[in-house]
Image: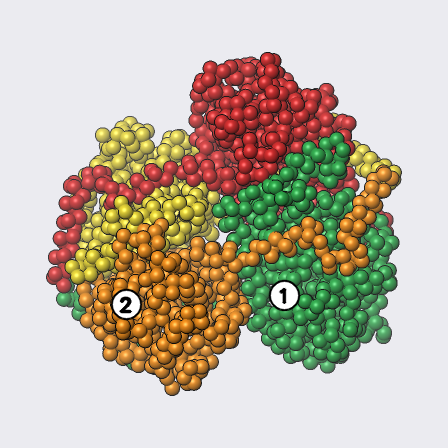
Chain colours: A green, B orange, C yellow, D red
């Protein structure tokens, strides 16, 4: 079987040697760095669960390319059932990690490029699709994790890529050689970048003809020469070095472990290039990727909601307030919002469609609705979690104080709850709620897969206002209503004339 | 084919002679009464569209009972595809009528009784299901419209049915005879009641043993002896007598045309009785009905949203403000909310399940989420429609003023818009938006299929808080995480001990 | 004393003979027309309460012009205390009428013109202010009610006044004569127009030089030759002809009784002209009026909220559900929103300032905040009122059905509540909640005193973003923070250098 | 003059030697500990600004006790003007620090005890008020900062204080001696505790007779024997040790620097005891304190909003998107919400009243409205700040990476913006927005001064539902409306009889 376990994934990363910086220092081993480990564990779980019998159905699939059972994270969706299973997988992993497990970005990149390379070839007679499938087959066989590197640094956003003073604010082709291309530039806040086997790049926006060199997509191993990663600081990141208790979610961390990827004169052989100048397909690639990716948020974030709802309820029990009507009401609102987002993502999966490439795509309007709701509702339900959990989540002392022989016992007493709820467990849960609600998780829900303004543009564009106008004009009687005429058995004009005659008569009688 | 056209439906009503009151007077002919006609037209459209080739797929189905093609409004859902088509039918009819077409209440009653009578028989060895199917076969063959009469008058709501001073506040069995039962009581605000062929009654709440006589369900023709209807007043109801223009939606009216149904010693033969004292099934019947019915609101009301969004946009065009960014933003928000509700109803249909009776039921948690969202979002999008349409919707003069030879021209000039938009059309559209947004449509969206508090109770109950607690305890490290142990390759306790040792060492070095 | 009682006000209207149309017919007597009476009663209450000893303080004031005690509705605000009393008067009248009492529009017009005519004269040496004061003295002495006629018909809103195809979409000067001006055009949806003694006109928007003839303000008696009123239709307007019970608020009606005012070659003598071409003051006049008027909405609508909150609570009691936690929570939310709006209007009054004319103006930023909140919160609290009151508010039968000897008793039983709550009273209250929440009151709260988009523009403009940027730059350490330097006792740069040195040392130790 | 400067305040703290723990270690010097310094700076600014000429008016007052000019933070409010100036002071300090300056808790404690000790003495003939004034005079003369220690640890919240298994979860009197009392227990998350000169304690909830020993209030110096402080961890707290840039607001920190205060057999002499068993005044004390304290949040948090709005706008400029309509709309919404909260706090100050003690109290209903709004709107405006600022706020690398000679330049380029905006400044501002919006500031806004549920209880209790019911009954015509009878000139019953007669006639004519 072409799937790795969690541990095999971790081991496989040792074979790579990417150039990673954090806190101003080169990190010698990604796998051994305590700052990175929680992120690695979260990604490892995407591998591990594919080996649990109870999750086979949703964690694995049979490749249409290599015919083998593969991890669903490398699968090209063959029908709407695949799309639905994908979001079930997202919710499951959100429930298990309580954070971002990073691997969906690559998955969406794989599918978006599968769709788009096919369409480019159709128009231009290029052979990107074949190249892409060859690389994809490798990914599936080796069960690799590619990061999906889309967002460029962007500089002055009122300028287009080619207008930027410093071209490196966007990744671009510097030179075209016989055997490949030379690229330079910066991709910003790329999820799971340092612990991916491969980097899969895509352009970040619609490009015009003058932006041709910026319309580039390719895949390279993470330790390719000329590639440097700089790992981001995160909310409370160093707590994992201080104390597992203080960290909140010491196993799986917080958010996705974003990194900047700097490309300096990096050589990419042609067989790994999937777009090189076809600027008129940048929109399709961006929108296809964004469509897949936005739909995920109704899966993973709802999984997180499940955790935070459960945690809030447990804390309410521990504090002896779980029967207060306002607590139940808040939990109900949280559930209702979570299931609303879940419904949106289910709907956009069930209503997916087949693209010319054969891969299935989600319903684009509904996918944008998913994400727009997420950008608001995550904030709402996390606010309610904080409301239920209480001010303690931000005033807990450090684990070291609990262990201090002089004051430890007193400090612990300060967080005592109802009998049957060990104080250490209460603190663990409060720290988890802090980790999930007071931190980078919220802006990530806002901006990951594109900011709300981007979703609104898509919704306005896909909302079919013209057809809605026609409906309104027909009901209002501005446009003729043939079905109504069938019912009344006559021409509408004649009918209303009659009606008005009758009114006139009635009024005359008065 | 067992389906009537719109006109045939209207004609079929002439064969009935129900006792209907309105404005203190007995109405001699339901079909000819101008106050009732718009409601009849809306219901007629549910018949008419089944004859349009383009809507065959969603407006008709093949009966599993009689094997014929029937109107989907009399169909028992045989799979999730039927459930999805049902809500597509709802949206379509909402788009076409801009109001309530009434017939879904009966449809949901048919399915709920199909499910529940089966279960009663299983437990008690009764033969309600067989009786019900016999009656249902007639309904399907003749394409009848039964009203779904559930809500009782209820009196003092802090008292149970049998505790009410006046028992008639709930419909109940007064006497059990050899050939049938005698019932009395009142059903309140029953949609489409006066223009239904049959009345299908159901209990309105959970009943205890002492409420046994109130746990009653049966079907009778609308003109059965002892049955009286009192038709409700509606927002701006008499405008349809004054002027088609002032009415806003003169073709199809406003909301559902609710009526009170008074039962006075009405005899029901046993073959038309589907529950008679099995109080322990009242909850199942109510919840099954409510589940179906709540899911509909994400169909029909979204159809209405389509109309009101289209109308708002058209008015913005007519006023020359359709490119203002705040207008586009409001339209986008309206679309996003409408599609959110739509997604919820799609999801709860796709995620339906087979009941023991063979009929399919929707996903109960998600159906309640649909309706809770509707009770808020309908208000929001109608508020935005009013925002876009402007204050004119509530200060338009009457059609008579437009026709007055002295002032008419001046009045019309007052509502002039951009060139190409006839003033009469502008007025028509403003009146339609008034009709849809300033009136009974909103409280109907609030209380139809049960008030928000009812949905919240169901959501809290179905939200599976226990499982969510388990998820949170595992992520927080309170419960052992076996998958994490696979990844780290050791026992969790051992792992954290090591981590803490390493921290200690680092701190000692400092 | 220069104040009329309610009855005297009604009698005073008999002395006028305005040309009023409704339903296509000329109405012979405004006072005797049953369609108009509720509006007249509401306005009459503004007169009547000035005679109640308990309301002297807020309903009356001493004129700075004529030195007599006058009705506060004709008063020029002399200090912030006057501004605060004005909004207390608004809330009181909202509580007493449950609807619009119309007279604040004239009051705000009086104050806005007092301020602006002074400023025009200062710039141009005109004598508008003197003229205006003369007319105002008459208004105060006779306790007249002038309507405030601002909104023009406006036609295509993407065009300026002088660009309109039909100039009559805006009121304008057609001719300037020695003794006065000739004006024509249309003012739309003018509150209280038909029952005001005088019409006080103002331009509706910022005007450019080419719009000079549209920059016109004047006062004329309501029955001036060439002036025609067309009274608007309102939600459920004819119910007051059907039945006092069905009307909901038969005493005081619903909203303001708006009318179109058509001016056809109307002559206005110069002593009644207060602006005639000073287009550069149109913005000041509009904004000053809008400022006053927007602040009122936190008074009157909060008074209405008091009524609807009380009514909702009473209905909950009558239905036996007043102790349900969700009911209490909804009432609490309603109160919190109402008091939020009230706080905004109090604040913008307390924070008022003296204009060069001597009159006091409210705080413009906060006044716009008042109104923006109203445009949303009124919808929210009315939604909650409908939630508490239940679906009955839209399915009540007519009073005639209650009185029908055959069915009346049964119908009444249908609405029975808890003992001690007479059913007729329950119906009265349900009809009042219907009247207030399901009707024109909401769009009025949206668009009266200008639509939300207008408030947003003012808030953006008055929000002082530049100063806020300075604050942020100082806290962020971009701009030098002198106060911080005082605290640390040294230059900021030096300080941070030291801090960084210390960090370096600590890291080196590690 | 009895006021210290910022530096003098810092120096004065050196004279105290409180027992403070953090990270498991005893901190030798509060003033020199880098972890504490930002908090100390923020508090120091409350001293420093009192010496700036431009802020004299709002930062200082003249003591009614000692007749000298004092820092307003030690002042007893003598009129509503004092209350208004207090909230202006709050907003100013919020604008200057961008965080919590801690000193208002003590101020509110001073005023609450001034009011309550007076009332206790009135009832019981005790002399708490005199004692309190003596201590207060010292506080004013020496310009001391007392912390306000109210919240107890509380344990199982379904149990009352005396029912707790471990009595130390509430601070309580263990023994009453001739010269004082012995107290033990824990106060949790006390703002500014470690850098206050004095601790002022108050009970945390309504107490019954059996809770007598828990109804205790007193003041002691921070370094009193038996008192131990444990300082809380905060969001990103150790960043201030890593790098000023990463810290976001390195000058003034984040939130209030809460600490646990453990009292172990602490002796308090009688002259410093202000309540000792008068359990029936615990409610008054709690509510008076809470009233003052809740009103503050409309001051300080609005000051913070000013900073974050300014910062968001500046970032939008730097990114070249400040003219996008959605950005302007978001800024407008932020301003509108901030000014709404500000209006509420102004209103509750202007509408304050004199207590029997002579001190002025705010309007209790409105103060609770302030805080309830804050618990929601702070989340909203911070969400919008994150929306505008973009995902970068959570993916910025550390300052050390910027300084790394190999990658620093590339990393910096990644955050480049529009020309004229230095990249370091952009990073500073992004870090400030992170500091303010992604962290403990939000839960603090939720729970500080009491959680939303507490505010709702007060609003429901103070909302005067009874009077509102009366208003509704009068408008609905259930209660006789005497003012209406004056207007119509006759008895109401007679009037409606006439109306109904007229209706009857009209109907008969038809």
Residue D277 location in percent, x, y? Answer: 53, 22
What residue sits 57% from the left and 62% below the top? A342
D80 vs D378, left or right, is: left
Tell which subunit mark 2 falls on. Answer: B
Image: C59 above or below A227: above
B323 vs D169, left or right, is: left
The answer to which quarter of the image holds residue D255 is top right
> Residue tagged by mark 1?
A88
> Residue tagged by mark 2?
B176
Residue A289 location in percent, x, y? Answer: 66, 67
Q: Which of A244 and D507 is in front in this view?
A: A244
The answer to which quarter of the image holds residue C116 is top left
Q: Do labels 2 and 1 share a chain?
A: no
D148 vs C267, left or right, is: right
Q: Which of A232 and C51 is in front in this view?
A: A232
What is the secondary structure assignment of the residue under circle 2?
Answer: strand
Q: Quadrant of the N terminus of chain C?
A: top left
């Amino acid at each position: 079987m072409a799937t790795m376990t969690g541990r095999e994934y971790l081991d496989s990363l040792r074979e790579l040697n990417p150039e990673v910086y954090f806190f101003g220092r080169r990190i010698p081993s990604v796998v051994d760095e305590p700052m990175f480990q929680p992120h690695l564990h979260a990604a490892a779980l995407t591998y591990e669960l594919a080996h649990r019998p109870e999750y086979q159905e949703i964690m694995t699939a049979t490749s249409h390319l290599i015919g083998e059972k593969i991890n669903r994270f490398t699968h090209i969706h063959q029908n709407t059932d695949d799309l639905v299973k994908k979001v079930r997988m997202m919710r499951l992993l959100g429930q298990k990690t309580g954070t971002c497990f990073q691997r969906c970005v690559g998955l969406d990149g794989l599918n978006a490029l599968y769709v788009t390379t096919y369409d480019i070839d159709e128009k231009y007679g290029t052979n990107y699709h074949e190249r892409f499938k060859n690389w994809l087959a490798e990914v599936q066989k080796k069960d690799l994790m590619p990061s999906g590197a889309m967002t460029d640094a962007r500089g002055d956003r009122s300028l287009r890529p080619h207008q930027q003073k410093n071209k490196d604010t966007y990744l671009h082709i510097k030179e075209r050689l016989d055997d490949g291309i030379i690229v330079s530039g910066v991709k910003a806040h790329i999820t799971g970048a340092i612990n991916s086997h491969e980097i899969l790049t895509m352009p970040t926006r619609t490009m015009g003809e003058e932006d041709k060199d910026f319309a580039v997509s390719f895949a390279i191993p993470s330790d390719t020469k000329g590639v440097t990663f700089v790992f981001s600081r995160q909310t409370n990141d160093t707590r994992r070095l201080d104390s597992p208790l203080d960290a909140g979610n010491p196993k799986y961390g917080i958010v996705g472990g974003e990194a900047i990827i700097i490309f300096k004169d990096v050589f990419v052989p042609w067989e790994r290039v999937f777009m090189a100048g076809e600027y008129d397909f940048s929109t399709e690639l961006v929108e296809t990727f964004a469509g897949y990716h936005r739909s995920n948020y109704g899966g993973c974030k709802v999984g997180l909601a499940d955790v935070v709802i459960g945690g809030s309820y447990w804390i309410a029990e521990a504090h002896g307030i779980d029967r207060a009507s306002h607590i139940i009401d808040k939990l109900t609102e949280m559930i209702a919002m979570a299931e609303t987002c879940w419904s949106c993502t289910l709907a956009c999966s069930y209503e997916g469609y087949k693209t010319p490439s054969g891969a299935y795509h989600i319903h684009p309007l509904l996918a944008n609705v998913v994400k727009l709701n997420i950008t608001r509702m995550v904030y709402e339900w996390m606010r309610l979690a904080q409301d239920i959990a209480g001010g303690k989540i931000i005033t807990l002392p450090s684990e070291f104080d609990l262990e201090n022989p002089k004051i430890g016992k007193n400090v612990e007493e300060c967080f005592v709850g109802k009998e049957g709820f060990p104080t250490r467990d209460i603190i663990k849960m409060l720290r988890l709620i802090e980790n999930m609600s007071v931190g980078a998780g919220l802006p990530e829900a806002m901006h990951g897969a594109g900011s709300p303004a981007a979703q609104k543009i898509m919704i306005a564009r896909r909302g079919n206002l013209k057809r809605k106008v026609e409906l309104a004009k027909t009901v209002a009687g501005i446009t003729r209503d043939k079905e109504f005429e069938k019912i009344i058995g006559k021409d509408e004009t004649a009918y209303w004339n009659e009606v008005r005659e009758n009114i006139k008569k009635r009024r005359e009688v008065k």
